[in-house]
């Protein structure tokens, strides 16, 4: 591995670590549940980037199932939180209901 490659790896690793730390801070201090959910999605995406970079560096595909599981966890978590946060539509908010019958 050359010097340029090593520097590039350290810089990208530092950027990914900074992303994870900032998102962890947002998860802890986020004012709303949606801020926390977005931050946790970014943390999972960052983790998938780290795993993908490790796969590219070491030339293997053994951790692809782990990446699929992480992606599925992010999707299911996002859907669950969005369904929890979404307000049910009342009679005046339902589409197609005018109230003048």
Image (cartoon, rainbow, N blue to C red):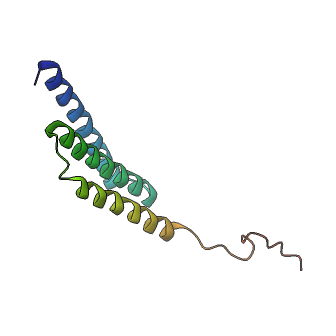
Number of on-image labels = 0
62 horizontally vs 98: left or right: left
Q: Quadrant of residue 11?
A: top left
Q: Residue 14: horizontal and vertical position, in percent?
A: 21, 33
Q: Residue 92: horizontal and vertical position, in percent?
A: 75, 73
32 horizontally vs 28: left or right: right
56 horizontally vs 95: left or right: left
- At x 20%, y 48%, the residue is 61
In the rendered view, tell whether residue 17 sits above or below residue 65.
above
Q: Can you say which quadrant of the picture contains the C terminus?
A: bottom right
Q: Residue furthest bottom?
A: 101
In the rendered view, tell whether residue 83 sits above or below residue 6.
below
Q: Nearer the viewer, residue 46 or 86?
A: 46
Q: Quadrant of residue 70?
A: bottom left
Q: Residue furthest right?
A: 101
Q: Quadrant of residue 2?
A: top left
Q: Residue 27: horizontal and vertical position, in percent?
A: 33, 54
- At x 28%, y 48%, the residue is 48
Q: Nearer the viewer, residue 50 or 61?
A: 61
Q: Residue 1: horizontal and vertical position, in percent?
A: 10, 25
In the rendered view, tell whether residue 21 sits above or below residue 33.
above
Q: Residue furthest top?
A: 3
- At x 23%, y 40%, the residue is 53
């Amino acid at each position: 591995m050359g010097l340029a490659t090593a520097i590039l790896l350290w810089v990208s690793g530092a950027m990914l670590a900074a992303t994870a730390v900032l998102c962890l801070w947002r998860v802890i201090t986020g004012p709303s549940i949606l801020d926390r959910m977005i931050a946790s999605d970014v943390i999972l995406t960052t983790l998938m980037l780290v795993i993908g970079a490790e796969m590219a560096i070491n030339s293997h595909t053994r951790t692809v199932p782990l990446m699929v599981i992480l992606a599925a966890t992010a999707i299911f978590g996002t859907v669950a939180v969005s369904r929890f946060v979404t307000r049910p539509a009342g009679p005046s908010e339902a589409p197609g209901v005018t109230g003048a019958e």
